[in-house]
Amino acid sequence: MKLTPMLASFVMHFGEMGSRWGFNRTVGQMYALLVAHEHPLSANDIAEALNISRGNVSMGLKELQSWQLVQVQHQQGDRKDYFRAVGTIWDMAKKVMEERRKREIDPTLSLLRDMLLDQPANDQERYAQQRLQEIHDLLESVTKWTNELQRLSPDKLNTLLKLSSGVGKVLDMKDKFIGKDSA
Amino acid sequence: MKLTPMLASFVMHFGEMGSRWGFNRTVGQMYALLVAHEHPLSANDIAEALNISRGNVSMGLKELQSWQLVQVQHQQGDRKDYFRAVGTIWDMAKKVMEERRKREIDPTLSLLRDMLLDQPANDQERYAQQRLQEIHDLLESVTKWTNELQRLSPDKLNTLLKLSSGVGKVLDMKDKFIGKDSA
DNA sequence: TCGAACTTTCAGTAATTTCTGAAAATTATA
DNA sequence: TATAATTTTCAGAAATTACTGAAAGTTCGA
């Protein structure tokens, strides 16, 4: 398993990025490697291509499988497990989005809810609660949107993404023809 | 600077979350502390409230200032610098979004562009390039959207987020008012 | 039920990131 | 200009996170 220079640089870069997207360097590299390969790879292939230990590969694959980004596949007459990236690029984006929401938003939202139920003990806390309320409302809206995005068909998702610069326009139209109260 | 239990738990939690939102634990705590306080705090207040070193506070404030989330303010007759969280919660969300785009998307996009200009050396690379193209297109759309969101007024942003069953509605509106071809 | 082929686990180590605190730099005042 | 108040810097220490590799676990065929 030797990588061409192009693949190598893609894989390395995805490693760097991986750590910013919620998984660690080697997991990112492993995923990039699998995405770029049409045919499934064995754990040993991966360890060799990336120059990392067999144990590390095992842990990484476990994580990628738990994200449902990677699947085992068996080849007949071979006892080894083979792995491939699974799903479209959309599926990957959704998974990352969902996972990040779970880890970055949900816990905060639940803490904020609790805190907003408490009676403020003094002016200080009264002020703090107001700011907390704003954060809460924002995070709640974001959560609602990501939930909806999860449900959208790839087709609609595409339309939506391509709309981008149209957002402003659409909102203008809304105000003009439907009125502010209908939101 | 002693915090009430409520504030303390908010601040600590934001610290945990901070590390998931792109800054480290103490920077997250510092920001939470400043957001929750109506009146500006001195660097020493912060160090004391959070039980961290003065040097650490200095570095953290520098980072928060570079994100334009925090501002210095002087009190007359006092030589110390005082700090306050600045901007609405929207401004914060935008800053975080922008900063993350810069760090998580832009570099990848630029690498992918370069790689897509190369001639594939073999079938392997041809396949890889196809997948890379998909990733590229996705990231490019996301970038466009975040740019668009940055430009939206807080008012419109609010309308957009609050749209009940938002996504579907936006798409409906688009079809209705703009027509399918203009996307 | 044995053993070969393979995978997983996890204690210890390595790499990375964050934090401290003392020293250097800056700033304001007299 | 000297000095006192304050902030910044940064080398080293501490804390956290990731990785290795040997040992334990699993699976399957004979």
Image (tube, coloured by chain):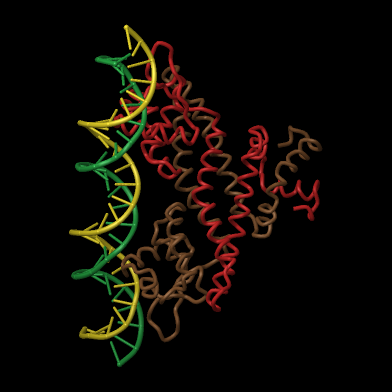
Chain colours: A brown, B red, C yellow, D green
Q: Residue B154 in the image: x percent, y percent?
A: 63, 33
Residue B83 coordinates in the image, percent (x, y) = 43, 24
* D26 over A129 or under it: above or below: below
Horizontal side, residue B82 vs residue C22: left or right: right
Is A118 in front, or is B34? B34
Hey, which quadrant is residue B19 in on the image? top left
Residue at 45% x, 65% y: name it: A11
Camera-side residue of C3 and B19: B19
Which residue is rendered at x = 52% and y = 75% of the image?
A38
- Of the pair B110 and D25, the residue shown nearer to us: B110
Residue A137 as seen in the image, left or right of residue A126: right
Image quadrant assignment for residue A2: bottom left
Residue B143 image point, x, y percent: 60, 50
Q: How many marks?
A: 0
The image shows residue A86, relative to residue B152, as above or below, that is below
Q: Please report the residue visible at 37 percent of the width from the left and 19 percent of the height from the top.
A: B80
Left or right, B180 with reference to C13: right
Q: Is residue B127 above or below residue A76?
A: above
Query: Is D23 situated left or right of B64 in this image?
Result: left
Q: Nearer the viewer, residue B31 or A105?
A: B31
Residue B152 lies, in percent from the top left, at 66, 38
Quadrant containing the N terminus of chain B in the rendered view:
top left
